[in-house]
C-alpha cells in the first residue's frame, strides 16, 4: 500500500524478527511495554479494522504480503515501518494522505474513501493501536496530532536466503532459432524489431513503409491483448519472426504478433523485497530471451517455450539495486546495470555470460574510494552518497566495440551541499570497451546536479556530413530539456538545442523536461531523411507529478513533435497535435484516464466562479478532478512537503 522513498538498505536492515500475532493479539515490539500500547489513541472501530483487513487482502496483499511484512513491497508493520514513517515531522494524517492518494499503485480511485480509511485502520491495528467507538475518516482531527507509534506487529515468516544461482529443469536448452549475431548486426535494415531501440545504434527507425502519411488515418486495431496485471506497463516490445515479447514486473509473455494469441507466459517468483515495479523489456539472441528482475536476478528463457534456462542473482536488492532496463546482448555477453539512483545505489554496469550469467566485468559509475573519479565526491563521512543508476537502453558501435551508456543522477538527489564536487560519472555519457569494460571516454553534461536532471539517453549513434566532412556522432538527451550531439572521435560538443520551454515548470523544482510537465522517457529517433525526431516536448498545458514515487497525478496537454537537422541541430519541422493526450496516465485499471475535449473543459470553467475554476496543470485523481484551484495547489504542495519531510531531503537533522 505504501511506496518507500527511504533507503532500502536501511529499512531492510531494521526488519528484525517480531513475536507472533494471533487473531486478536499482538506482541510488543522491541521490548515496548503495554503501557506504551495503551497510550496509543483509539482512532477506529473494531468493525472498521475487520472491513479493512478484507479490503487489504483483496487489493494490497499481493504486493505487501498476507501479514503486511511478508511481501515484495515495503513492510507495513514492525520496526521497518516505524523506521520509514516514524519521523516526528510526519503525522498520521500525512501517512493516511499518502495512502489514500497513491495506493494501490496506478489505481487509488478503485477504492472508496471508506475503503481507504478501513485499510488504514487495519494497518494501525496490526501495529498495536487499539480500537475505539469512533470511525476513522480523512477528517479525523486526532490524525493531525499523532505520529506513528508501533508497539506490536505480526510475526514475519522466516524467509530462506535467496539462491545465488537457479538452474533450469533438466534437458531444457535454448531454442533452435535465432537471431544470430549476424542478424543482430544487421538489425538497422531488418523489418523485425530486435532491440528495445530497434538496433545496436538505437535509431528507433524501421525501413517498413506501408504506414505513411496517406495510410495512417485508416489504421484500425487488428487484435488486442490484456496483460491482466495491475502494473506499471513500460515494456518495449521486441519482435522476431512473427513473435512479440513483452514484460511486466514479473511476467515475460510471447504473443503471436499478428493475432495477439499467447504462445507462452513465464512468471518469475520474487525471492527478495523490491521497491520498484517497472520493467522495460528483453534481449533476444540464439534462441534465448534474457531479462532482469526487480529482485536483482538475470533470467534466461527458451524463446520458443518460455522454459527457464537459468537465473542468477547479480544485484543486491538489500542495497537498493533493481533492474528495469532491457539488457543488451552482444556475442556471448549480457550487458545491464541497476536502476533507481534515489535508492542511493552505488551504480555500476556489468557484462555477464549468456550461457549461465557468470560475471565477466564491471564498471563502477560511482567510483569506489581510490578509483579515478572518486575525488569528485566530497561529502561528510556520515552522509551516504551514490546514485549513477542506469535505466535506458545502451547503444553499441559493433565496429569499434564502443558501448555508449547514459548514467543518471547522483544521490542524495537535490541537496548539492551534501555532495560537493562534480560527482562523476553521474549525468554523463560513458563509453566503455564492450569486451573488457575499460573506460574509453566520457563527457559529463550536468555536473553536481541539483534538479534531478538525469542524462537519460545516449542514442542514437549516426554519421553526418558537417562542412564536407563525415563525422561519427551520438545524440544525448535528458531531463534538463537539452538535445546535445557529440562527436564520437573528438568527444567535443557539436551542438545543443533546447527541446522544452523552461517557463512551463509547475509543482516542481526548476525548468527542464522532467519538471515542465513531461519526462523525457523517450529518446530521439533517427530518420535518415528528416534528421533527429523528438517525442513530446514544449507542452502547453497539463502537469506531471512532482515526485516519481507518488502515483495518481494526471495531466493533459497538446504535444508537439519536432525534427532537428543532423548536421546543425536547427529546427526542420515542428508539428503540434490538435488532440489532447494524457500525461503520466496509468493503465485503465486505475480509472485515471481523464481524456476530455478542451472545449468541454472551458465550458465547465465558464460555469464556475473564477475562484473555483480548476487549476490547469494540476489535475489529480478522480475525487479531486474538479477541485478548486486552492485545494489543487495545496494537494500538489502537500505531497511534495510530506515526501520532503519523510525522505529528509535537506537532512537538517544530520550532524
Image (cartoon, rainbow, N blue to C red):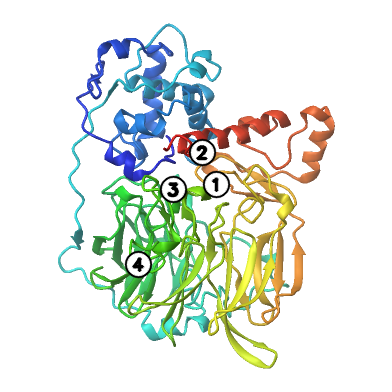
Q: Which image quarter is the N terminus in?
A: top left
Does label 4 or label 3 sit earlier along the sequence? Answer: 3
**How far apart are the two marked residues, 4 and 3, measured between alpha carbons?**
46 Å
Where residue 596 appears, x then y in whole percent? 72, 43
Q: Earlier in the sequence, mark 3 or mark 1?
A: 3
Label 2 Cα crowd, 10 Å radius (few <14 / some 14-19 / many 20+)? many
Nearer the observer, 231 or 223: 231
Extreme right residue here? Answer: 606
The residue at which mark 2 appears reads as 107
Q: Which residue is mark 3?
A: 228
Asked whether the residues under the numbered discs 3 and 1 touch, taking CB atoms below 8 Å apart as contact, a structural biologist would say no
- Which residue is identified by label 4? 371
**C-alpha distance separating marks 3 and 1:** 14 Å
* Location of the C terminus (image quadrant): top left
Could you tell which of marks 2 and 4 lies nearer the N-terminus?
A: 2
Q: CA distance from mark 1 to mark 2?
A: 8 Å
Is 251 placed left or right of 272 in the picture?
right
* Residue at x 83% of width, y 30% of height: 610
Q: Secondary structure at mark 3?
A: loop
Q: Is residue 483 above or below residue 622?
A: below
531 vs 367, nearest the viewer: 367
- Which picture quadrant has residue 210? bottom right
Given contact means CB atoms under 8 Å apart, are the residues at marks 1 and 2 in contact? yes
User: x, y percentage for residue 574?
Assistant: 76, 67
Q: Report crowding for label 4: few under 14, some 14 to 19, many 20 or more residues within 10 A (C-alpha).
A: few
Point out which mark residue 586 bears. 1
Q: Residue furthest left?
A: 170
State whether residue 76 appears in this view: no
Amino acid at each position: 500500500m505504501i511506496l518507500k522513498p527511504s533507503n532500502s538498505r536501511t529499512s531492510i536492515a531494521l526488519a528484525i524478527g517480531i513475536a507472533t500475532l494471533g487473531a486478536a493479539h499482538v506482541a510488543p515490539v522491541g521490548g515496548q511495554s503495554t503501557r506504551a500500547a495503551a497510550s496509543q489513541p483509539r482512532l477506529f472501530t473494531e468493525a472498521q479494522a475487520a472491513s479493512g483487513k478484507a479490503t487489504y487482502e483483496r487489493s494490497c496483499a499481493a504486493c505487501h504480503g498476507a501479514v503486511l511484512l511478508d511481501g515484495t513491497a515495503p513492510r507495513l508493520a514492525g520496526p521497518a515501518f516505524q523506521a520509514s514513517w516514524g519521523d516526528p515531522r510526519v503525522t498520521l494524517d500525512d501517512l493516511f494522505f499518502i495512502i489514500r492518494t497513491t495506493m494501490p499503485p496506478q489505481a487509488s480511485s478503485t477504492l472508496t474513501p471508506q475503503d481507504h480509511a478501513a485499510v488504514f485502520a487495519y494497518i494501525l491495528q496490526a501495529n498495536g493501536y487499539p480500537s475505539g467507538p469512533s470511525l476513522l475518516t480523512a477528517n479525523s482531527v486526532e490524525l493531525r496530532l499523532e505520529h506513528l507509534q508501533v508497539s506490536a506487529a505480526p510475526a514475519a515468516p522466516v524467509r530462506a536466503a535467496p539462491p545465488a544461482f537457479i538452474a533450469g529443469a533438466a534437458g531444457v536448452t535454448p531454442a533452435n532459432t535465432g537471431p544470430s549475431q549476424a542478424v543482430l548486426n544487421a538489425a538497422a535494415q531488418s523489418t523485425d524489431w530486435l532491440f528495445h531501440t530497434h538496433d545496436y545504434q538505437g535509431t528507433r527507425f524501421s525501413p517498413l513503409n506501408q504506414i505513411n502519411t496517406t495510410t495512417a488515418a485508416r489504421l484500425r486495431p487488428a487484435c488486442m491483448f490484456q496483460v491482466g496485471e495491475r502494473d506499471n506497463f513500460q515494456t518495449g516490445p521486441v519482435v522476431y519472426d512473427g513473435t512479440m515479447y513483452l514484460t511486466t514486473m514479473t511476467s515475460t509473455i510471447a504473443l503471436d504478433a499478428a493475432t495477439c494469441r499467447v504462445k507462452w507466459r513465464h512468471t518469475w517468483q520474487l525471492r527478495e523485497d523490491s521497491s520498484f515495479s517497472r520493467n522495460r523489456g528483453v534481449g533476444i539472441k540464439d534462441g534465448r530471451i534474457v531479462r532482469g528482475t526487480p529482485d536483482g536476478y538475470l533470467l534466461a528463457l527458451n524463446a520458443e517455450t518460455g522454459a527457464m534456462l537459468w537465473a542468477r542473482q547479480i544485484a543486491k536488492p538489500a542495497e537498493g539495486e533493481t533492474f528495469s532496463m532491457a539488457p543488451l546482448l552482444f556475442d556471448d555477453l549480457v550487458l545491464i546495470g541497476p536502476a533507481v539512483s534515489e535508492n542511493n545505489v552505488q551504480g555500476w554496469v556489468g557484462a555477464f555470460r549468456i550461457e549461465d550469467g557468470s560475471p565477466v566485468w564491471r564498471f563502477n559509475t560511482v567510483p569506489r574510494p581510490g578509483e579515478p573519479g572518486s575525488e569528485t565526491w566530497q561529502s561528510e563521512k556520515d552522509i551516504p552518497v551514490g546514485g549513477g543508476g542506469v535505466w535506458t537502453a545502451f547503444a553499441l558501435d559493433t565496429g569499434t566495440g564502443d558501448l555508449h551508456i547514459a548514467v543518471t543522477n547522483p544521490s542524495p538527489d537535490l541537496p548539492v551541499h551534501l555532495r560537493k564536487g562534480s560527482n562523476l560519472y553521474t549525468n554523463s555519457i560513458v563509453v566503455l570497451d564492450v569486451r573488457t569494460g575499460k573506460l574509453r571516454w566520457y563527457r559529463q553534461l550536468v555536473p553536481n546536479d541539483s534538479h534531478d536532471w538525469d542524462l537519460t539517453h545516449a542514442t542514437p549513434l549516426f554519421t553526418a556530413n558537417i562542412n564536407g566532412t563525415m563525422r561519427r556522432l551520438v545524440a544525448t538527451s535528458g531531463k534538463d530539456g537539452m538535445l546535445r550531439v557529440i562527436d564520437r572521435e573528438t568527444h567535443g560538443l557539436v551542438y545543443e538545442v533546447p527541446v522544452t520551454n523552461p517557463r512551463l515548470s509547475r509543482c516542481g523544482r526548476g525548468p527542464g523536461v522532467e519538471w515542465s510537465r513531461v519526462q523525457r522517457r523517450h529518446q530521439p529517433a533517427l530518420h535518415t531523411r528528416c534528421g533527429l525526431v523528438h517525442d513530446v516536448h514544449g507542452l502547453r498545458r497539463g502537469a506531471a507529478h512532482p515526485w516519481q514515487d507518488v502515483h495518481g497525478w494526471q495531466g493533459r496537454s497538446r504535444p508537439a513533435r519536432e525534427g532537428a537537422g543532423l548536421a546543425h541541430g536547427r529546427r526542420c519541422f515542428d508539428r503540434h497535435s490538435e488532440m489532447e493526450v494524457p500525461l503520466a496516465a496509468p493503465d485503465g485499471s486505475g480509472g485515471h484516464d481523464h481524456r476530455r475535449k478542451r472545449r468541454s473543459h472551458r465550458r465547465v470553467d465558464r460555469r464556475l466562479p473564477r475562484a473555483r475554476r480548476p487549476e490547469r496543470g494540476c489535475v489529480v485523481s478522480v475525487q479531486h478532478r474538479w477541485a478548486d484551484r486552492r485545494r489543487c495547489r495545496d494537494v500538489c504542495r502537500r505531497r511534495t512537503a510530506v515526501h520532503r519531510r519523510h525522505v529528509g531531503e535537506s537532512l537538517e537533522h544530520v550532524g
